[in-house]
Image (cartoon, coloured by chain):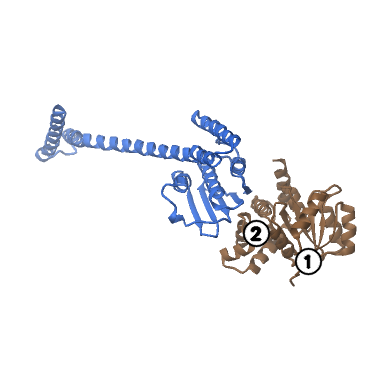
Chain colours: A blue, B brown
Amino acid sequence: MLAGVAAALAQVALGVGLVVAGITVFFVTAPSVASPTTGILATAAIAVGLVMIFGRWWWRLSHDLSVERQERIRTQEKAEVAAHIHDSVLQTLALIQRNATDARKVSTLARSQERELRAWLFDTPELEAGESLAAALERVTNEIEYLYDVAVETVEVGDCPVDERLIALVQSTREALANAARHSGATSVSAYLEVEPDQVTVFVRDRGTGFDPDQVSRHRRGIADSIVGRMDRHGGKAVIRSEAGDGTEVELVMPR
Amino acid sequence: MAVTRPRVFLVDDHHLVLSGVRAELGDAVEVIGEASEVEAAIEMIGERLPDVVLLDVHMPGGGGRAVIEAVGAKHPEVKFLALSVSDAAEDVIGVIRAGARGYVTKTISGPELVEAVVRVADGDAVFSPRLAGFVLDAFAADFRGPVDPELDQLTVREKEVLRHLARGYSYKEIARQLSISIKTVETHASAVLRKLQLTNRHQLSRWASDRRLV
């Protein structure tokens, strides 16, 4: 440690020496265009000196920046994992609790969750890049209809292949549908997908009980992480409009 | 002029559907007859002249479209509302272009169906979310060739109304959302229906048949 500090000090001192020497040469010899060699040497000495003085700091700064970037990516990945676990495993556990007396339903839920979780862990995502967005959305709405016993009226305008961001959009849509199915009390939910040249928009709407978005418990991570956070992380936007007694509409916009 | 208790005629080749629809409509309308075949329907509608014919899109012998075309030629005052489980765009666009004033799916609730019948009886258009989506899709497709803006393009406001319909909003909710009167919403919907019936977009038929293959 001490040796490191001594080396650093020696390096800075050497750098300062070179810079001072270089500047002195300029003053003393006043190099001309006719004999440029001394000028070039002096300039080189100043440059090397500056690198010796500031090189370490610069290197450390860029190193810190890249560490910070890695940290940010890790945090994002963690949030992504948390959102996925919330959507899948936690949801299923909640469903199992609610259907605890129905042995057959419980085992169906457990089995389908196991399949889904394995597929996700072993890197065969249920939504694959390149598949049709409309088809992906239909699969999700079918799943919601099956899980929660609600009717989802789906209207699609346009279509395109899904990429990573659109997969996030579909997952957010799924969460919005699941929220509507579980909390609104409505027997049907509307889902509207529109693909435009510059963006993809999804509206999920129910005519159920509605809620005050500011009053939702911090523990309910569904809206914060799985809808708003997920859309944010992928460069999109989520707007939730709801009023007690007047239903809820979730608007999801993802630029293309 | 508002028709308070419209006289309705039902056409469907499934008797179960006929009795189901009858039950859902209840006393809000007067059901003056029903038919389960295209030929019989054309004849009876011509005799009884109902305000609104509620008819299935799919039927042997030409379907709802054949009924609309045959009756419409002689009795243009009879209005048609298509009722279907079919989601094929080609069929839906087909009955509208034949002259139906609207399209609803059989999953519609009783009160909503009554509202739709009354609206059609009043001469307005009825769009299910799905029909609204089909129309947006059809008019969004690239259109090469001469464009008649009166018929081949939707206005910004019309698109906005259609988008709300596709999102599941009722006319009343749209009126509130856009701060316009229900009458204005109805006017926009009727204008869209007219464009759908009269546009020369050749894409419309090709687009619809493309959708069918999917």
Residue occupied by mark 2: B154
Image disc number at residue B134 = none
Tell me the quarter of the picture where residue B124 sits: bottom right
The residue lying toward the viewer, choosing from A19 and B97, is: B97
The residue lying toward the viewer, choosing from B167 and B141, is: B167
| Mark-to-mark CA distance, 2 and 1 | 31 Å
* Side of B140 where B209 appears, left or right: right
Q: Where is residue B64 in the image (x, y as percent from the top left)?
A: 81, 53
**Is there CB contact under 8 Å for labels 2 and 1?**
no
Q: What residue type is labelled 1?
A: Pro
Residue occupied by mark 1: B6
Q: Which amino acid does label 2 sit on?
A: Leu
Decide: is B2 above or below B100: below
Q: Where is residue B113 in the image (x, y as percent from the top left)?
A: 72, 59
* Side of A55 where A125 appears, left or right: right
* Side of A145 where A224 appears, left or right: left
Quick one: which residue is furthest to the left in this view?
Answer: A28
Mark 2 Cα within 10 Å, few/some/many (few <14, many 20+)?
Answer: many
Q: Which chain carries label 1?
A: B
